[in-house]
Amino acid sequence: MDGECLLLMLKYKAENEGKLYQEVDRFFPSSKTCHICLNQFESLPLDVRQWTCENCHTKHNRDVNAAINLRDEGLGILTCGTRDKADRQTVSRSNRGLH
């Protein structure tokens, strides 16, 4: 199954269950942006699975951090009504991620 087919299936399933489906730009820097202080690394190689933010010193699991950032960006897009860069400061953050 290719990625486009998977996204269509997710969209169908979400809408069928009365849920919202929101895509985030595929180049959104979800893995290399600290979800706590929004500091962004210029480069984060794929083999780096855990990293510490140089700004706020939060320890991140790459995948958990990316998931939190994608959730926040999607909520920001829905809140602002635009697919441009959302004002992520208006979206409340969760403490459920691993730090």
Image (cartoon, rainbow, N blue to C red):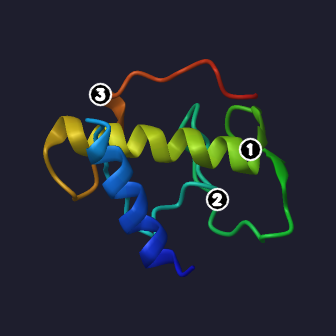
**N-term-proximal mark, 3 vs 2:** 2
The residue singled out by tag 3 in the image is 90
Q: CA separation, marks 1 and 2? A: 9 Å
Residue situated furthest bottom in the rendering: 2
In contact (CB < 8 Å): disc 3 and disc 2 = no
Q: Secondary structure at mark 1?
A: loop
Q: Can residue 87 be seen in the rendering of this structure?
A: no
The three-letter code of the residue at mark 2 reads Phe
The three-letter code of the residue at mark 1 reads Glu
The three-letter code of the residue at mark 3 reads Thr
Tell me residue 94's x, y (percent): 53, 21
Q: Secondary structure at mark 2?
A: loop
Tell me residue 53's x, y (percent): 73, 42
Q: Can residue 17 be seen in the rendering of this structure?
A: yes
As drawn, the label of residue 41 is: 2
Crowd rating for badge 1 (residues with CA inside 10 Å; few <14, some 14–19, many 20+): few
For residue 79, above or below residue 16: above
